[in-house]
């Protein structure tokens, strides 16, 4: 591997010192390296950190400087091009961005020597239907979440699986998670942790007003449909849907959210030989 593209979260590396050091390190060793030029949200339009059309041809690896959030956005944005990403952790836990600040040079050397492997991570596709018309759609590497926004009232929804009613909930919301996302909001809400390379969909109600509310694990080929129930206090109690914590969409009565496995998958470069269970134990401690 000798052709790299560096994506930087300017909040994490505001003066681009680490970015410049990485570029110089790679070029000094005969590799090609291009830096992304950060743009404002308005300039980015549909992209958070990187426009795939701006990535030069023959790039073999996207190096992401930031936390897991930055890596998630970059991985989604590059999924269609099939270019793998490697995260350099400037965030907190760093389940995905596995390279730490103190071993950047060693990690880059391993890339140059092709001492790595690539994990395929499934993603979710979500569509919001209003009066049978799609009003919004997006993909998620971590999760698709319906939550309340405003007053502290619970919201009502029905869940269908492959067209069959599963249950009706009154709750703070619901999390539909990929295996990668199970260590995020799903974990905080009491959901199970899954092997990140598995192909399953985890549905976890958030603080449901019931005695028998539990997460449910489905196979990758199901279709999850969530129907938003009528809310008499809609003006005080907005309901929103978010993809990986962003791209908020306000939901209305009778809106339906259709969630399936996405056709695209994210490619994550792994250098660490530590098993997922070892990594999980280390991060949790």
Image: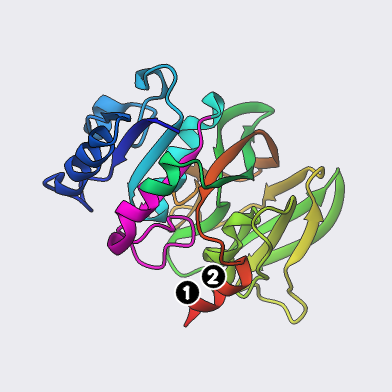
Q: Position of residue 98 (x, y in %)?
A: 44, 58
Q: Is residue 275 magenta?
A: no
Q: Position of residue 6 (x, y in %)?
A: 31, 36
Element assignment for label 1: helix
Q: Measure the alpha-carbon separation of dots 1 and 2.
A: 6 Å
Quadrant of residue 194 within the rendered picture: bottom right
Element assignment for label 2: helix
In the image, 202 versus 86, the foreground residue is 86
Whether residues under marks 1 and 2 lie with C-beta atoms below 8 angstroms apart, the answer is yes
Q: Is residue 86 magenta?
A: yes
Tell how many labels.
Answer: 2
Q: Position of residue 170 (x, y in %)?
A: 66, 67
Dot 1 alpha-carbon crowd within 10 angstroms: few under 14, some 14 to 19, many 20 or more: few
In the image, 103 versus 212, the foreground residue is 103
Q: Is residue 31 above or below residue 156?
A: above
Q: Which residue is mark 2?
A: 279
Task: Write the start and end of the magenta stretch as one range.
Answer: 83-108
Q: Is residue 197 in sight in this rendering?
A: yes
Left/right of residue 77 with respect to residue 118 in the rendered view:
left
In the image, 236 versus 85, the foreground residue is 85
Q: Which residue is mark 1?
A: 283
Left/right of residue 50 with respect to residue 154 in the rendered view:
left
In the image, 230 versus 104, the foreground residue is 104
Left/right of residue 144 with respect to residue 32 in the rendered view:
right
Looking at the image, which residue sits at the far right? 164
Quarter in which the N terminus is drawn = top left
């Amino acid at each position: 591997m000798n052709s790299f593209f560096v994506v930087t979260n300017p909040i994490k590396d505001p003066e681009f010192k680490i970015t410049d050091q990485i570029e110089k390190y790679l070029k000094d060793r005969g590799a090609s390296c291009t830096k992304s030029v950060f743009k404002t949200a308005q300039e980015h339009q549909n992209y958070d950190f990187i426009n795939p059309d701006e990535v030069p041809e023959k790039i073999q690896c996207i190096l992401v400087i930031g936390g897991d959030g930055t890596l998630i956005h970059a991985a989604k944005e590059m999924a269609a091009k099939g270019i793998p990403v490697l995260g350099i952790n400037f965030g907190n836990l760093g389940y995905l961005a596995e390279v730490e600040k103190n071993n950047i040079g060693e990690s880059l050397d391993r890339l140059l020597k092709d001492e790595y492997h690539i994990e395929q991570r499934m993603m979710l596709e979500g569509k919001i239907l209003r009066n049978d018309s799609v009003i919004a759609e997006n993909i998620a590497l971590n999760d698709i979440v319906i939550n309340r926004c405003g007053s502290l009232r619970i919201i009502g929804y029905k869940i269908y699986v492959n067209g069959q009613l599963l249950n009706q909930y009154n709750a703070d919301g619901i999390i539909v998670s990929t295996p990668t996302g199970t260590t995020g909001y799903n974990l905080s809400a009491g959901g199970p942790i899954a092997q990140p390379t598995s192909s399953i969909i985890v549905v976890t109600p958030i603080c449901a007003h019931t005695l028998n509310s539990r997460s449910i694990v489905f196979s990758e080929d199901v279709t999850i449909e969530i129907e938003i129930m009528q809310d008499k206090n809609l003006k005080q109690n907005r309901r929103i849907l978010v993809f990986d914590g962003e791209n908020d969409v306000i939901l209305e009565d009778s809106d339906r959210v259709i969630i399936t496995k996405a056709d695209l998958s994210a490619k994550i470069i792994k250098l660490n030989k530590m098993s997922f269970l070892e990594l999980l134990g280390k991060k949790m401690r």
